[in-house]
Amino acid sequence: MIEYLLPGRRGYQEKLYPNPLLLKPDVGLKTFAEVIAHFTASSLAQDGIAIKPDSLKVIRGEAGYRIRFEPMVGFESQAEQFKAMHVAMLDEAHFGLALKGADACKRTPAWNPMAGFPVNRSDGPSEWLPCLPLGMPIANQRAVSLMHYPPIVAYRTADYLNNMTLRRWAQLLTCVGNQETSLYHSILDVNPIAAPGSGESEYPNDYFPINLTSQFFDDEKHGLTYVRSMLELMLNPPANASNPLTLPLLVCGSPLYDPQAPGWFRTRYKALLPKDQNGSPTVEVLQVGLVRLNPDSPKQTPYMIANHMIAAGVTGQCTSDPSKIPNIQKYEAQDLVAATWLSLYADAVAHGKAFDPQAAKEAACMRWFGAPNGDGAPNPPDPNDRLTICALAQMDLCFDPVKIAPMYTFEEASARCKQAGGANMSPCFDCKPLSASL
């Protein structure tokens, strides 16, 4: 039996989790104990740690909340690592720094400047709430994705993972041959505050600029170092202890959609990044390298700059130049390179080999661009990979705003590409059904 007390007193612990009074009623979570159990069960499932049925209990006591569960045979060691990571993440030096930064922000006009007014068509009056990365893999994750901020719907539904962004990401991972997609669902936001957004109208309403992160979640002078403290922890869980590098970091943000996470990365690590002809640090999509998260970090972190995982679906278009975004094929190929790059890291670790970020990028680009870099138009040597690009693009182009999902499954989109995509498998044809068989 695994049993442990969450760090801090009960009042502190409850601030780390969504307030059940603010959740949608159909979520069905009425107490903090139920909320904590819900997110703990989700993390265990995402980590692939099997536990005995009905063994997960959250006990509320005077000292706070206690977690108890019994792992299935063969999962005991992973369960112990889960316990260690869960306690560490929730302590004052990690999640506690997010609360501290949010409290500091609340004392300034920067906190929710549009309070009481809607800023998009779906979320109601603007509301900001501290929202931490709960319910994700925390022991067996294969990578960490750095993103901007969680949409308010993630808080209200007590579900960070049930959204179109991660469903598309899982599809990309599956397309490159990765079958353990949940282990790539570890996300850290540079602003741990749930707010309206979710692809609706972020640029007219972007109240989370880079300097908000720098002031409240990455400020050494005032001890507000949430982002880097969390990266240090999440990128080197106990399962990765023997590897000379940390887990890989995917820094997500397209130049045309949600570029704030790469923007923060650029300002924080400007001395370690490549420079352009003017000497300015760069964070170009598909750029890779190694950084040390803090000057005294024992390991270096391999990183890749990537598009936001939903950028292709939001801003992708059929254009005459497939070598530049917003061309939809270019988007798809770049995203497939990022997914492949992460899989190559996992393969290297599994076989005890050294990981070279640049060599892995070149291998991934050869697969999806037919060249060792992603500067030009996609030209995969394998016809099946050309079909994959077409099918993914059809899914992104043919979107049902009512269902909030693609009109076609990957299999249906593939069939459509075979019928209407032509010799080059172009996805740029009508979204209407092509025949009764489809």
Image: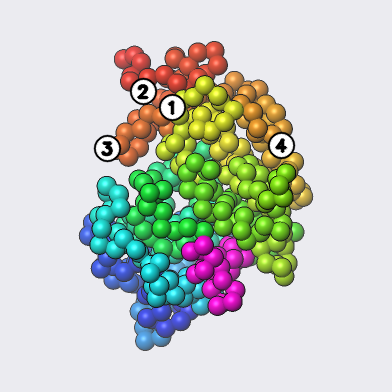
- Please state the horizontal and vertical placement of residue 155, each as a whole percent of the image: 35, 60
Which amino acid does the dot numbered 2 rest on? Cys
Disc 1 to disc 2, C-alpha distance: 8 Å
Q: Give the mark nearer the N terminus: 3 vs 4.
A: 4
Instruction: Relative to 405, say whether 116 is above or below.
Output: below
**Residue at mark 1:** 394
In the image, farthest residue toward the left? 25
Q: Of 191 and 203, which appears nearest the observer?
A: 203
Query: In the structure shown, which secondary structural element does the residue marked by tag 3 occupy?
Result: loop
Does the rendering let one see residue 314?
A: yes
> Do the CB atoms of the residues marked 1 and 3 lie less than 8 Å apart?
no
Against 326, residue 308 (above or below) is below
Q: Determine which quarter of the picture holds residue 398.
A: top left
Residue at 56% in and 71% down: 219
Does 228 appear in magenta? yes
Give the magenta-colored segment's residue range.
211-235
Residue that sits furthest to the bottom in the current view: 62
Going by the numbered disc 3, the residue's amino acid type is Val
**Cβ–Cβ under 8 Å for marks 1 and 2:** yes
Q: Which residue is mark 3?
A: 402
* Label 2–label 4 contact, CB within 8 A: no
